[in-house]
Image (tube, coloured by chain):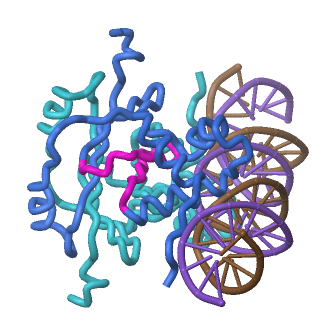
Chain colours: A cyan, B blue, C brown, D purple
Amino acid sequence: MKTLKYSRQRESIKTCLMARHDHPTADALYTSIREEFPNISLGTVYRNLNLLVELGEIQKLTCGDGADHFDADTSPHYHFVCRNCGHVYDLPMDPMDSINQLAQKHAEGQVESHTIYFYGTCNDCLGNN
Amino acid sequence: MKTLKYSRQRESIKTCLMARHDHPTADALYTSIREEFPNISLGTVYRNLNLLVELGEIQKLTCGDGADHFDADTSPHYHFVCRNCGHVYDLPMDPMDSINQLAQKHAEGQVESHTIYFYGTCNDCLGNN
DNA sequence: TTATTTAATAGTAACAATTACTACTACAAT
DNA sequence: ATTGTAGTAGTAATTGTTACTATTAAATAA
């Protein structure tokens, strides 16, 4: 079995992700971490992000804009994606666990979880701010 | 303004997509279309799939497995994705339009639509079949 | 029908996001 | 200290997708 070994880079990746709430892509995170670790490798960022996802310490968001985004908040919650600027916002609404049962009635298999992405235009892009 | 011109390739792409219900990727569709058009180009498949999406004649599914999938059924409906084999199944359940209003209460912008993907293990992978 | 215009194509190159590889480094358990 | 192994930087390779270019073919007009 492989024992996990401490690394400053991984710590920094997680700390940095926890500090921001804009659900950055691997590349965006890479850019901000380079301020602290000027010669960190993009591969290191990807590898550790995936490792942290496997450990259940962060979660990956695939909202359909090409690149995956990452979120340090692992509690089940939904996201609102602006079709105009691509910004991803947390949606502080209760998770609807009941819809799994709803889906289960029609599914050809065992339903375990679900993801929801809401799409629209954010206040910034609407000029309401 | 650009007028749309008929092409056998596009027709075949749409016909082929309508004939199957396994939500193929562009590459999978490319493979089956090559039986009829042995020298069709993968770029042609991508270009026409995206064009058909823009025209609203098909829809694109981004279920998080890397490649986009395509669905000739444009009516709003949800999908069940097997985490084991990657298969994508239609979920014949009513669309829950009301959850847009729910999300709207907490969203920092104008909510227009949503997507839901249910994840789990399909009957084939469970051995229930 | 032929000629003309222009969208669509095949083939290939380019691209972006991500992963794999390799030699080297650093942690940690003898 | 030595040694085993996880982690790293740097780079190459892969994958999914889009862009480019010369050519083909569909629609329109003569």
Task: Identify which residue, A2 or A94, lies in the foreground.
Answer: A94
Task: Identify which residue, B81 or B32, lies in the foreground.
Answer: B32
Task: Identify which residue, D4 or B33, lies in the foreground.
Answer: B33
Total tally of numbered discs in the picture: 0
Residue B54's spot in the image, x, y percent?
A: 42, 65
Q: Is residue B87 in the magenta section?
A: no
- Describe residue B29's horizontal placement relative to residue B82 as left or right: right
Residue B86's spot in the image, x, y percent?
A: 46, 32
Picture residue at 27% right of the left edge, 70% below the top:
A120
Q: Mark yes or no: residue A8 visible.
A: no
* Position of D30 relative to B21 (above/below): below
Q: Mark yes or no: residue B24 visible.
A: yes
Task: Identify which residue, A98 or B88, lies in the foreground.
Answer: B88
* Position of A89 relative to A128 (above/below): above
Picture residue at 60% right of the left edge, 36% below the top:
B32
- Describe residue B77's horizontal placement relative to residue B22 as left or right: left
- Describe residue D26's horizontal placement relative to residue B41 as left or right: left
- Describe residue B57's horizontal placement relative to residue D20 as left or right: left
Residue A80's spot in the image, x, y percent?
A: 27, 64
Picture residue at 35% right of the left edge, 71% below the top:
A83
Picture residue at 54% right of the left edge, 47% below the top:
B12
Q: Quadrant of the C terminus of chain B?
A: top left
Residue A23's spot in the image, x, y percent?
A: 40, 63
* Position of B59 relative to B93 (above/below): below
Q: Provide the residue span drawn in magenta.
A: B56-76
